[in-house]
Structure formats: C-alpha cells, structure tokens
Image: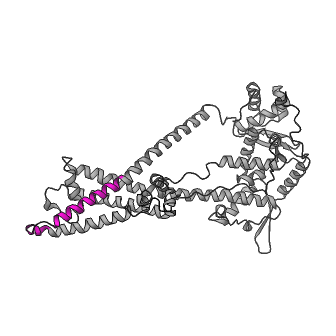
Amino acid sequence: MKQVRDREAYQKVTGALRGRRNGATIADIVAKTALPLRTVQELVPVAADEYSARLEVTESGEILYSFPHGFVSKYRGFRAGLRRAAEKIKNGIKIAASWAFKVWIMLMLVGYFVFFMLIALAALVLSMAASSNSDNRSSRRGDGIGGLYLASRIFNMIIHIWFYSELLKTADPYYQGRGAVSQARAKSRPLHKAIFSFVFGDGDPNADWPVREKQAVIAYIQANRGVISLPELMALTGLPPSVAEERIVSYCAEFGGLPEATEDGTVVYRFDSLLLRADTQNRSFPGLSGPIKRLKSFSANEKKMNVWFSLINGVNLIFGSYFLYNALNSGAILSQADFNASSYLYGVLYVLLSQVAANPLPVIIFFTGFVPLIFSLLFWLIPGLRFLRNKQDNEEIKRENFRKNGYGRIWDAPLAVKPQEIAPQAKECRPQNLAAAQDRLIKEFGAYANPDVSLDDTGKPVYAFKELNREKAALERYRAGIASGASKLGKVVFDSGSA
C-alpha cells in the first residue's frame, strides 16, 4: 500500500467512499469532504487500490468509483493482519523444514551409502577368509563361495558407482592440476548442492517477475507520453480483463497515475510523474511486447549426475529392502550354521552389531531396514512430484505468455483476428493444447470488447473488435494531444552547490 502524507485527509476520503458504495466521482468526494480537488485526486486512487474499487465511465466522461465487493481493505484490519501473519508463519515453517530436510537428505544418501559399502567390504573380507579355511570345514565351503560371489558383485558395483562416478572425481587429488579437465571440474557444483538440485530443484526462475513486469510497464508508459490503456496493459502482462483492471488501479496508487476519459468516453490512465526523468536514456518501446516468463527446469545438474544419484539411491533401496526382509524372515543369527548365500550379508551385519548391541535385530529392522527404505522412496517421490508440478506450472506459464502474444496481436490488428494464426513458435509461449488456448483467448478478450464474427474463404472464423479499434484510435488522438515536452524537467533554476 502506498504511504499517504495526510492521514486525516485520507480518512475523510475513505469515509466518503464508504458512504457511497454504489459509486462516486471525484466531485462527489470533494463535496462530501471539502478537501482541495488536487488532494482528492491524489488520494482516491490510493483508496481505490486498498478497497478494490471498480472503475466505470459515465456518459459525460467522468470516472465513477464503485465497490461491488464491499468496502474491505486489502492491507489493514483483522483479516488482512491475520492473512499476513499466517503467510509469514507458513514461509518460516517452510524455510526451516526445507533446511532440515536438505541436511537430512545429504546425511542419509551419502551416510547410508558409505555404511552399506563398508558392510559389503566386511562381508567380502570375511567371505575370503572363510573360503581359505581348512578342509575339515569344506562342508560349509559352498556357502562361503556363494557369499564370496554375492559380496564381490555388490562391492564391485559400489566401486563402479562411487569411486568412478562424477561425484568424487571433482575432489580426487589425482585430477587436480590436470589442465582443462581440472578447471572444468573445479567449476562443477559441490556435492550437497547437486543433491539438493536433484531433489528440490534450483528455485523459481521467475522470482524477480514482479519487478521485471513493473519495469516493462513503466518503460512502456514513459515511451508513450505517460499514458496507457487497459488492453495495452493486458498485452504487456498477459492478465485477463478483470485482473488487469485491479492491477492498473494498483499502479495508479503506486506510481501517481490518474484515470481520465477521452472525449468519446474511452478510459486512459495517465502517469505524468513518470515522465519527469533526468535520465536521458531512450525509452522507445519495440512494439507492444512485454517480457515473457521463463520455464522451470527440473535441475541444473547434468543428466548423467542425476542418473548417478538415482543409482546410488537405488543401492540404498536394495540394501534396505534386503536387510528388512532377512531380519523379518531369518531373525537372530545364533551360529555360523545360520549363514547361507542369500543371507550372508545380513549375517555379517548381525554379527558386527552384536558386538555393540545385546539384541541387534530391532536395530537392523529399524535403522538398516525401515529408515533407508522409506528414505529411498522419498528420495524418488519428491523429485517425481516436483517434476509433475513443474509440468503443470510450465503449462500455466505457457498459457500466460500465449495470452501476451495473443492480446498483442489483437491490439495490433483488431478488425481481422484469426485465432488459428495466433500460434507462436517459442516453446515458452506455446501451450500443449493450442486450439483450446486460441479459443479461450478470444473468449477472455471478448469479456472486454465484444467482437463481430464472420467466416473467411476456408470457413474459419474471423473476429472484428470494432469497439477496440475505436478505442485504439481515440487513444492515439489523446496521446497526440499531449505535447512531447510537456513533462520535461526544464532548466535548473536553483543549485544548492552554487549558493
């Protein structure tokens, strides 16, 4: 909400508007409050933004401010305060939970992988020792050979995944100082950031969108003599008419704009204060085309690195499932006779844990069974859900960018709009169901200006927005009537440095 200097005057203006919910003009508020005309003209747009006013034009060309949704502040009051507090609490919990979850994921993925690797190594050593025992234990050698084979295959798989993956080559001293290879690896992402990128992504590429959009709108206003119309704002932002109307009222409150009516009743929004620039930069605007939103990417990692993360997580899933299954089916290992090829690793883990725990079975079931199993499922589930969410968000981004393109095309040539020709090639602007998007575009813009419909030679519809064309001509005449140098700063008449 824009801060006002005279709170008492603002309270009088809002009080007068509250008493005229069905609509009031600037003159009505002046008569009710006895405030100066200039003060009312400055404060009414601020109140219109805070209380979500609707702007209408009377036959005489006056702007009528009405409040069809009631006179409820967006920024003050119990509900507004509760909404802001809830949003802050939500964001705080989200940040704390995200940070804790990221730390947990890092420890779990790497920690369990290293732990399982050590168990496999221990099983390999013990199996090799068992296979070299005396002949009087040959009756059990078959189990030893089976355990040796199983442990060696698992250990070899771990060696290939871990030591020869892209994860440790970055930190391996062997690769330091080896020219371009080492420089490329030195620029690679740290392991924990790469893991977080796989699970959580790399943030919203449009986080700065409100600023970028405002900058584009301001640039357009400055390039067009301080004046903008509602359909022009729609083409710049991709907002449908009802939302664009709320946005332009908000801009008026924020940047000192005022709605005016042309001689034929067309509403325009004038921002003379934005033209008072000392900056001599050329603000000419290349057509009616605002910035477009970027599509969300799944991860900034190389595809190969994400594959390695999936494989490592798969190893954790296999080990967790293996230990949980054997713990629930084999139970306690009482003697070497309980060892066999299929449960050899489980037996090794049981024996090792029995040195530090009186009853290793619950430890194995929970810490090496349920925990890594659940974690591994979450490690795949979260990116999977995020992938689906990104797909939905990207589709909405494409629809919004498509609206910008389509609204701009309609504004450029309102008398001959062919929906089938509104088909941008950029992937950021092309929805999946293009035909449905084209049909929806015409309906949305038709809520602002009803078109006439005819058929071309091929039987396809052609829409003529005659009222929009009239509005466009009125806007051009209005801008032409504004002197090009009317809002220049002029010469410096006082300089404190020369005093």
Q: How many marks?
A: 0
> Up-down: is 60 above or below 190?
above
> Up-down: is 246 above or below 376?
above
* Image-quadrant location for residue 286: bottom right
* Image-quadrant location for residue 81: top right
Q: Residue 492: percent from the left, percent from the top?
A: 87, 35
User: Is residue 234 within the magenta segment?
Assistant: no
* Image-quadrant location for residue 49: top right
Name the residue nearer the viewer: 65 or 204. 204
* Rendered residue at 53%/56% (across/down): 389
Q: Residue 351: percent from the left, percent from the top?
A: 19, 54
User: Is residue 123 within the magenta segment?
Assistant: yes
Residue 403 visible, this orientation: yes
Q: Residue 171: percent from the left, percent from the top?
A: 43, 56
- Answer left or right for 100 relative to 421: left
Quadrant, the C terminus: top right
Q: Residue 368: percent from the left, percent from the top?
A: 29, 53
Name the residue nearer the viewer: 118 or 206. 118
* Rendered residue at 71%/32% (across/down): 3
Main SS, magenta region, reads helix
Name the residue nearer the viewer: 232 or 363. 363
Q: Which residues are magenta?
A: 111-140
- Answer left or right for 474 relative to 54: right
Residue 228 visible, this orientation: no
Residue sticking out furthest to the bottom: 458
* Rendered residue at 77%/49% (across/down): 219
